[in-house]
Image (cartoon, rainbow, N blue to C red):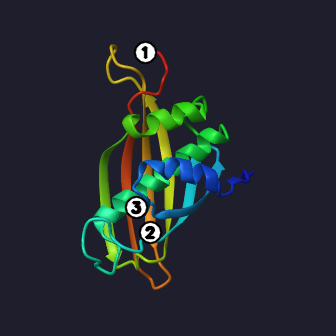
Amino acid sequence: MSVAPVLLDNDAALLDEVLRCYKPHCRYLKSLTVAVTGDRVIGTGTFSIPEPCYIDDTGHLNAVEVGICYNQLLYQTMATMVRHSTGPVLADWTMDEFLRRYLPDVLIASSRNVFRRAIDSQSFTGEFVIERATRYQPRADLPERVALETSYRFWDELGGECDGEIRVVVVDTGTAA
């Protein structure tokens, strides 16, 4: 018997709050919906990058922008999970706690990115997936951590695409050691 996913629609006010840490011209994520099926979480978002924030326009999505877009997908998906107390991790966090901790406590530990075909940065879609979440304690004197094994992909209407796998670590989950 398959379980129907819980679908969480875009929350524009939450998106504005989560992206507040970005300069206005670097808020690339425009909307996001989240589907939760057990421990599997998929955030799907729409993006637009009218102008790169650090270089002359290349006409396509590049590695720096993929990193920014990935982070925005990650943060908004996590915020949505916290807001709805759902998903494999962070269900015990409050929104105030999330908003205070998502920048200092959520780190990219490793990444692999593959660019298959140039993506039009003016309009594209992205998908972020939590494949697996694991709680662990690296040492007895350190707080518990959560490792998120994630994947992502971006694509456009013209066949552009890239994808990758990123390991994210929440270095302080707020639980006692």
Corner quadrant of residue 169:
top left
Tell me the kind of residue under disc 1.
Ala
Disc 1: which residue: 177
Q: Is residue 147 visible?
A: yes
SS label for mark 1 = loop
Query: Which is nearer the N-term, disc 2 or disc 3?
Result: 3
**Residue, x 34% and y 58% (percent of image)?**
67
Give the left or right position of residue 141, taking residue 33 as reference: left
Tell me the kind of residue under disc 3.
Cys
Tell me the kind of residue under disc 2.
Phe
Q: Residues within 10 Å of mark 2 (few under 14, many from 20)?
A: many
Front residue of 33/48: it is 48
Task: Decide: is 115 above or below 104.
Answer: below
| Most distant residue in the bottom direction | 158
Q: Position of residue 85 (x, y in %)?
A: 65, 37
Q: CA distance from mark 2 to mark 3?
A: 17 Å
**Residue, x 58% and y 62% (percent of image)?**
31
SS label for mark 3 = helix
Query: Which is nearer the N-term, disc 1 or disc 2?
Result: 2
Query: Which is nearer the N-term, disc 3 or disc 1?
Result: 3
Q: Which of the two discs, 2 and 3, sits closer to the camera?
A: 3
Q: Position of residue 164 (x, y in %)?
A: 37, 60
Q: Residues within 10 Å of mark 1 (few under 14, many from 20)?
A: few
Instruction: Assess whether mark 1 and mark 3 are in contact (beta carbons under 8 angstroms).
Output: no
Disc 3: which residue: 26
Q: Position of residue 172 (x, y in %)?
A: 41, 27
Q: CA distance from mark 3 to mark 1?
A: 37 Å
Residue 154: assigned label: 2
Q: Which of the two discs, 3 and 1, sits closer to the camera?
A: 3
Corner quadrant of residue 144:
top left
Task: Decide: is 162 above or below 94.
Answer: below
